[in-house]
Amino acid sequence: MKKTIYLFTAISMFLLGACSSDDNAIIQEDFVVAFENPSLSFAAEEETKDVNLIFSRPASQDGTVTVGYTATNAIYGEDEDFVTLPNAVDGEIFIDFFAGDEGASFNFTKLKDAIEGTEKMITFNIQSISIEDAYVSGNTTVQVTFEETAALGGTNAPEVGGVNQPNQVYIDLSAQKSMIINREAWDLGFYSGDDFRVIINGSLYMAAAELEATNIDLITAADVAELQSQVAVGTFDAANAKYVDTPDGNLEGTAIKKISAEEIENKVYLINLGYEVGTETAETGAVDITDEPRGWMKIRVLRSDNGYTLQYAPLDSDSHSEVNISKDATYNFQYFSLVEEKEVVAQPKQGEWDLLFTVFTNEIPGFGSYGYADFIVTNRLDGVKSYQVESETIAYSEFTSENVDTSLFEEDQRAIGSKWRNGGGPGTLPSLKENIYFVVKDPAGNNYKLKFTSLLDEDGMRGYPSFEYALL
Amino acid sequence: MKIYTPLLFFLGITVVSAQQKPKDSLIVDQLDEVVVTGQYDKQSIDKSVFEVKVISRKTIDQLAANNLADVLNQSLNINIMPNPSTGKSGVELFGLDSQYFKILVDGIPLINDEGLGNNTDLTQINLDDIEQVEIVEGAMGVQYGSNAVSGIINIITKKASDHKWQITPYFQEESIGNEYGWFDKGRHIQSIRIGHNFSNKFYANATYTRNEFTGLLADREGKNHQLNDGERGYEWLPKLQNNIKTLFRYRKNSFSAFYRFEYFDELTKKYNPEVRTNLNPATQTTNPTASDEAFFSERFYHHLSLSGKVFKKANYQASFSYQEQKRNVETYTYRIKTREELNNQNFEYESRQGLYSRGSLNNLFKNDWFSSQIGYELSNINGYSSFLAGDYDSDNIERRLESYDVFTSAELKISDKFSLRPGFRAMFSSKFDTQGAYTLSSVYRFENGYSLRANLGSSPRNPNYDELFTYFVDVNHDVQGNPNINPERGSSAFLHLKKTFWFDDYNWKMNSKLSGWFLSVDDRIELSIVNQSPLAYKYLNIDSFKNWGLSYANDISIRNLNLGVGISFSGESKELISQTGYNDDYLYGFQLNGNLSYSVPKWSSVFSIFFKHNGPEYQFIQGQNEDNDVVFIKGKRGAYSWMDATVKKTFQDTNLEISLGARNILNVTNVTNTSTGADGVHSGTPANSVILGYGRSYFLKLLYNLNF
């Protein structure tokens, strides 16, 4: 009997010690509603736009957001200046949403343009939300102007395209516009300005080496075999920087020398076409930028009447194709695809972009060229400049036009570059630098403050950047 | 109420068991220390030709050690290197890591998720059913095969009891540094062991231990911290272990057989310090998330051992074993505000499983001056390493390694004073070239009581998966494993001079030992530059490693007092042909240890204190000078000391044992370390301090011996 008591007590003590408390109940968050952007403006040709509302989390039940407005020099109505859908009733618009929705929107139609010299503007505000524990914060109003004005600010999530980062995304902050180009769409860019310059596509890790010859048909694979292992990105050789365009964006430093008026000075170039866009999935925090190599070509570029003549051929070919590419002053570059053998538009018009999200060929001093993912380039040719500010010096929310120090603006197109993120490494995921933001001067001279809000998606996959910005 | 339950329990025991007779079996063990490691048969430690260090059950109890990491910290030459970010702890011996060191249980290697016997996580080896731990320093390839370069540990389990029934429950409460709470903080151990003699032939025992380590926060903020300031998660990862072990033993005349089974599981949670704030600029709200991982390991161990006599004089031993250890990982996104887990994915992370057998036949031709052993060792191990566990170009690695070894040795008793033991092993494998290992051991007993032992030995170290299968090639990198590399060649020479001194009419006793050694590893595998432009790395058999040293240890017993002091001094040289401009000068370090235990029979109490000092250690590391040239700089790992103290009291009339103590009294957490260099390929932040411990902590262990 005694033994049984011991055993029983021993076992009960054991079980007691083994239990523990663990409170893992899911906690429901507040439901916050705001306008996606603080301002919207209409270009002359635009008539209708959606005004978006953003929820902080998917709605847990059906409900209605009530939006009111105040109009400046404008009247609501079919025969007046503007209408909305759903229609406004007594100065209020009721927008329904359903459980699971992550946002809602209403449509705004401009009926009459602003008269030159008067400001026509509607300011919408969120008046109420029909469900409990719902709040309005952040962009509580949106200002809609009838003529084109620089955006007061906003948010943007450039569609770089995830871990393979297949896209180059051009952003125009003031016009709230973006343009998406597949990285493989182009190989060479021909400068439309006064100078005669040709750039290579660094987002594919292309490289170019000048050869001795001037007759493209006489070059064979055997002639360049020894050179090929060096004409590449990431060889960890300081000397290979000359095979890529200077990463600061100065056209004086292109891998292909200035195209000379003297034909004899324009040599044949060996072109490493870089890599195809990656196709595989990547682990959390990693990228899969590159797939198979795109191979090699030889080219020679000459001046023509209104631009350039491009000769190109596969390495071992004893004949070549030739194409004339004319300068067009509305663009900075005319782009050509050696694979598709045609001209392509791969950049917005001159002055119509500020930032480019792209894979990039950078240089590590002492180690040569090095490929970067999640890189941001500023539009150097159109005068976009930027500099970095530490939150410790002055908080993002407190930074105003008075704080802009024009002496700090960097012309280098890498002024943002990879500074906005931590690279990560063995055992650490790459991450956003949350304690810095940037000041960006656009081609029109508007100054914006710009803060990155993500590098990864919620699950930690790369290639999902986003940022917010505000006009100073 | 919770707090009172254990108290009530022990009060209850005190009352009901007042009539139990006291019995102390510890004294018996003391008289003639017996070892089995490297022996043909059980052997008294004095007769062994090998120098075997024994950590007795008594020492384990005095340290209140629950796992192997708790006990080895105090051993000379051995360092325990914890990795707080994986929760694993490995051995470092003679400057070589746990790949070179083999852990055996009852003479057979113990599997883990990264290897058979090597790469063992010491915190996964529970000591509750252990009789003693035997340590042999130096290469033991003939006896124990490959990967036994720096030494081996043989864990000897309990296989007998003096009692018909032996029921031993205990629980142990321990603080982790200064963090302790009844449930959510500290280390909580509960264990019960039951042993039973069915007859004088059959014996069986079973042990269950639960060990909960809740992790150490230190300056960190736990899993629900929402800011990306590097403070989320734990400094030491929380983990929970369960361990079940059983043994059945049969013994008749000279025949003996046992079957031992072990199940072990461990859950480790890793909370990523990187928090993604996910600011929604429109609403100015955040949705912080993190990528977390939960690791779940399971080990199954079966061991059938047979031994007996054939042809009158000869005895045989045979072991058959199936073992597996699997480490699974669950990755998920954790939404910190709502405490939701999303996108849960389960993978097998790493595993080893397979069959093992070892057999030997001893003394087939035995006479007074000659005895011999012939034997075999076979293993057939399936290994798996997922793309998450290494850089294998997003592939999973699966590999079967079959090894077929045969070995032989002979012991020649040339005179009463001098015996010699040469041995050889041939190792055939499905993956590597055939390897050989040799040994030559001898003992000479001088007339004045001195004995001199010399041991030469060798053992290869097989390449690991990183060295074989790494494939990290992209536009910026080219780092490749090498399937054609050969095992590294390790060898060692040891000399031990020993004597026992007696004083004061045999009331004082002092065991003194002076040892010297030289250990080398050739064809060492190192990541090497195989092409400068484009820069490419590959693993090659290229470098070499040397270590020599001296140690002097004394054990003094004066009646109820036991005192041990030791000092060791060693030098290490690395020839790094894989690097340009290396420096292979010897760099020296030293260690001191001491322990004191004093028993007061009147109080049935033992007071013990353990101390070990690890002097600074130096290593040459790659760095850059002002001209950006690669140069080798002498890096230093700072000195630190371990001190533990325990009071153990036995209540004779109740069979209750209480141990109260403190670990890491000198409050070591980390030491400065300037000897971890950048790896040249992808230099992360160079660590300038290494975490060694979690600070001073206290424990209370209550154990009850119910024997009848």
Image: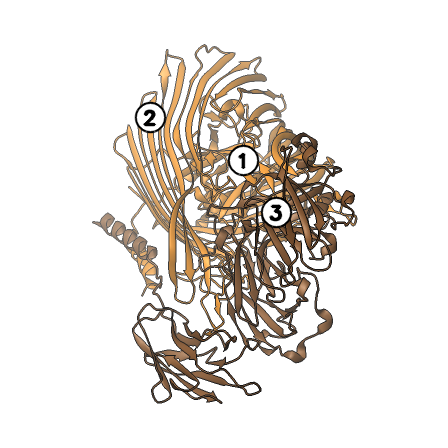
Q: Are marks 1 and 2 in contact (CB under 8 Å)?
A: no
Q: Are marks 1 and 3 in contact (CB under 8 Å)?
A: no
Question: Marks 3 and 2, Cα distance to the nearest angstrom?
Answer: 67 Å
User: Which quarter of the image is occupied by the C terminus of chain A?
Assistant: bottom right
Relative to the observer, which residue lies in front, B426 or A40?
A40
Q: Which residue is mark 3?
A: A205
Relative to B140, residue A397 above or below: below
Residue farthest along the front direction in this orientation: A305
Q: Position of residue B486 (x, y in %)?
A: 57, 26
Nearer the observer: mark 1 or 2; the answer is 1
Question: Marks 1 and 3, Cα distance to the nearest angstrom?
Answer: 40 Å
Whether residue A140 can be seen here = yes
**Badge 3 amino acid:** Tyr
Chain letter belonging to callout 2: B
Chain that is coloured orange in the picture: B
Question: Helix, strand or loop at disc 3?
Answer: loop
Whether residue B577 can be seen here = no
Nearer the observer: mark 3 or 2; the answer is 3
Instruction: Return the mark for residue B257.
Output: 2
**Badge 1 amino acid:** Gln
Chain letter belonging to callout 1: B
Question: Helix, strand or loop at disc 2?
Answer: strand
Position of residue A259 in the picture relative to residue B461 (left or right): right
Chain that is coloured brown in the picture: A
Instruction: Return the mark for residue B99.
Output: 1
**How many labels were placed on the picture?**
3
